[in-house]
Amino acid sequence: MVFTKRLREGVRRGDITCSIRIWMHPHVKVGGRYPMEEGEIEVDSIQSIDFEAITDQLIRESGFPDLARCSRWRNTAVEKISIWSGFTTCREAG
């Protein structure tokens, strides 16, 4: 999983607890660990959701300021990748 630079610090701090992705099929798996800079994250669950299920709280948890930024997703399949176990540094992981 790749996060934009703008979101990486929020992931490290634990402020961003999920990710909303538009994928034809999941690119990650539950329990998978994925590198991010000097550490990694772990995926706890993957859930297909409708656009209507995207709440303001979910948007904030995924690092977006508001739902308006995500309106282009309205007619697409959306995957909610949530809540990973948190960011672990390489020293903690190894």
Image: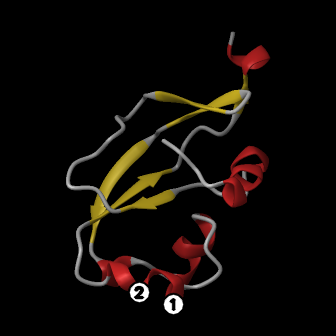
What residue do we see at 31% from left, 55% from top? 47
* Residue position for label 1: 68
What residue do we see at 51% from left, 90% from top? 68
Seen in the picture, residue 23 relative to 29 is either above or below; the reply is below
What residue do we see at 58% from left, 50% from top? 3
Q: Do the residues labelled 2 and 1 touch (CB within 8 Å)?
A: yes
Q: How crowded is mark 2: few (under 14 residues within 10 Å), some or many (20 or more)?
A: few
- The local secondary structure at tag 2 comes to helix
Instruction: Name the spot of residue 12 as percent of width and height, x first.
Output: 75, 44
- The quarter of the picture where residue 77 lies is bottom left
* Residue position for label 2: 71
What residue do we see at 69% from left, 9% from top? 94
Seen in the picture, residue 14 relative to 91 is either above or below; the reply is below
Instruction: Name the spot of residue 36 as percent of width and height, x first.
Output: 63, 35
Q: Is residue 26 left or right of residue 1?
A: left
Image mark count: 2
Q: In this view, does 66 lie to the left or right of 6?
A: left
Real-space CA distance between mark 2 and mark 1, rounded to the nearest whole angstrom = 5 Å
Q: Kindly identify the amino acid type of the residue bearing the numbered disc 2.
A: Ser
Looking at the image, the residue that sits furthest to the front is 5
Looking at the image, the residue that sits furthest to the top is 94
